[in-house]
């Protein structure tokens, strides 16, 4: 079980969401090292998201953040627009070992959203994780590769 960051964690239902889903505990920090606030929140693993998204309310605590390059994004309405990314370090915390964590610095940065829930996108999932979803038991595991 050493390679598992998250092992057999139950799905969760967050306030304002329709169903149970796989969530991870996340904390973020600025690359500049000027701020040392503990900024933690829940993020849903979203294999439909190309890029990781962070709630603006959480990221604002660390401002000013380094800006990344702009990316084209397609919203749920199908519209395409250009958005700026922000560079930061994300730490994903383990389950069942809460002291275990893995830090990531997404190459393209992350998007800031108005949601109070973050999304862990394919920029992290496809590069660093092997995930097992069990929809019947509503549990999941994340193995670091």
Image (spheres, grey):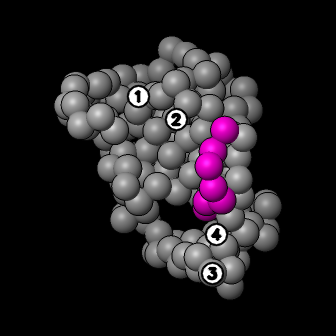
The region drawn magenta spans 16-22
Q: Are marks 3 and 4 in contact (CB under 8 Å)?
A: no
- Kindly identify the residue that appears in the image at 66 percent across and 59 percent down: 20
Mark 2 or 4: the one toward you: 2
Which tag, 2 or 4, sits closer to the chain's start? Answer: 4
Q: Please tell me how crowded label 2 is: few (under 14), some (14-19), or many (20+) other residues with Cα within 10 Å.
A: many
Q: Please tell me how crowded label 1 is: few (under 14), some (14-19), or many (20+) other residues with Cα within 10 Å.
A: many
Which tag, 2 or 3, sits closer to the chain's start? Answer: 2
* Callout 1 secondary element: strand
Residue tagged by mark 4?
5
Which tag, 4 or 1, sits closer to the chain's start? Answer: 4
Which numbered disc covers residue 86? 1
Residue tagged by mark 2?
54
CA gap, disc 4 to disc 1? Answer: 25 Å
What is the x, y in percent for residue 77? 29, 34
* Callout 3 secondary element: loop
CA gap, disc 3 to disc 4? Answer: 21 Å
């Amino acid at each position: 079980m050493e390679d598992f960051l998250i092992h057999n964690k139950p799905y969760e239902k967050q306030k304002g969401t329709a169903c149970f889903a796989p969530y991870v505990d996340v904390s973020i920090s600025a690359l500049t090292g000027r701020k040392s606030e503990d900024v933690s929140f829940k993020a849903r693993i979203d294999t439909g998201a190309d890029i990781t998204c962070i709630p603006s309310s959480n990221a604002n605590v660390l401002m000013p953040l380094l800006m990344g390059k702009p990316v084209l994004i397609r919203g749920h309405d199908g519209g395409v627009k250009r958005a700026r990314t922000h560079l930061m370090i994300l730490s994903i915390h383990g389950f069942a070992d809460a002291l275990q964590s893995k830090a990531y610095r997404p190459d393209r940065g992350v998007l800031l959203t108005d949601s109070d829930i973050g999304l862990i996108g394919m920029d992290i999932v496809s590069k660093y994780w092997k995930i097992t979803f069990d929809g019947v038991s509503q549990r999941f595991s994340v193995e670091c590769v």
